[in-house]
Image (spheres, grey):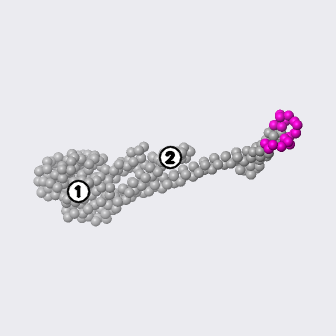
Amino acid sequence: MIRSFVFNQGKLVGQDLDLDSLRLVLFDKGLHIWVDIEGGSDEEAKAVLDGVFGFHPLAIEDCLVLSERPKVDEYETYLFLVIHAVDYTRGAEEFRTSELNIFLGKDFVVSYHREPLRSVTATVARVLKNAPSVARAPDRLTHTMLDFLFENYRPVLEELSAEVAELEGKVLAGASVNILGDAIKVKSEVQRLRQIIGPQRELIARFARGEFKLVRLHLLPYFRDLYDQIIRISDLAEGYRDSLTNLLQVHLNLQQTQVNEVIKVLTVLATLALPIFIITSFYGMNFGHFPPEGSSATVAYSWVFGLTGICTGLLYWWLKHKKWL
């Protein structure tokens, strides 16, 4: 799907033009346009990227081939950005990234993405509702798309926060037997988020520092605000990583404590059983001094059991006195 919007001093004056009309609009210096390409075949995308705008072949190639790393390349008359939106599926504990490619020129913005993006949909809705607020110039329109893209990180962070809180609750409630795999999986996704955020932070920092002439000076504070947003996202991701590290450490400590408790109980049982082993082993020997000699079996068994009980009781009292129980 190819959508196009034509603006004159921020006002929307045309929409969804054919390719020939787009070529004509490019020659009108009083207008600027936004073309959004969603999905479709590579040939359809090339018809716009190459046939209408004549972008560099390397930029077109980078646009059509998915890339894991955000970047910005500066050409003679335009900038080419690769940036990623994220989505997080709770329960599956996995991130799904969607690539957004933006060509930013003096009189145009071209965006390309293979899947629907909430940031682009929100920008289209804002354009249709109040175009002058977001579309006075291509750099302002680009800022709007990036702003919506980073705002959509918030639900992702909320899902991660809820996931971490749920794991912490399980550990504190003592139901931590099966959380190790989940915690490691969530931690790996947090690490992946950090790997996504890091390069994007550097990319936005370049805009905030005013490295590109296509971004007007009075818009730099807006890009610095974007930089602050991504710094907050990065700090939250770092906090989640630390929380999960501490959570795993607590989990392992609790497991070790449980093992120690089991060992303690088994040791006490073995110690209390020691008199039984000694006495039964002694009187189980084949000699004629079974107490009292010549007495009945009832008396003999009572003697052995009584002696065993007294020794076990004395041993139990001694363990309690030492506060080992």
Foreground pick, 67 / 4: 67
Q: Magenta stretch containing residue 46, yes or no? A: no
Q: Residue at x 41, y 51 (%)?
A: 189
**Kind of residue sitting beneath label 2:** Ile
Residue assigned mark 1: 61
Residue 225, image x, y percentages:
34, 58
- Alpha carbons under labels 2 and 1: distance apart: 43 Å
Dominant secondary structure, magenta: loop
Sequence-wise, which precedes: disc 2 or disc 1? 1
Point out the stretch of residues depicted in magenta: 283-301
The image's mark for residue 175 is none
Tell me where residue 300 sits by quadrant. top right
**Kind of residue sitting beneath label 1:** Glu
Residue farthest to the front, as pictured: 286
Residue 86, image x, y percentages:
35, 50
Q: In which quarter of the image is the N terminus?
A: top left
Residue 124, image x, y percentages:
25, 47
Foreground pick, 52 / 6: 52
In the image: residue 224, left or right of residue 319: left
Q: Which residue is drawn at 84% across and 41% down?
A: 290
Work out whether residue 228 can be spotted: no
Q: What element carries label 1?
A: helix
In the image: residue 162, left or right of residue 82: right
In the image: residue 187, left or right of residue 146: right
Work out whether residue 276 can be spotted: yes
Q: Magenta stretch containing residue 287, yes or no? A: yes
- Density class for disc 2 (Cα within 10 Å; few <14, some 14-19, many ≥20) is some
Q: Which residue is drawn at 26% across and 64% down?
A: 212
Foreground pick, 306 / 282: 282
Residue assigned mark 2: 179
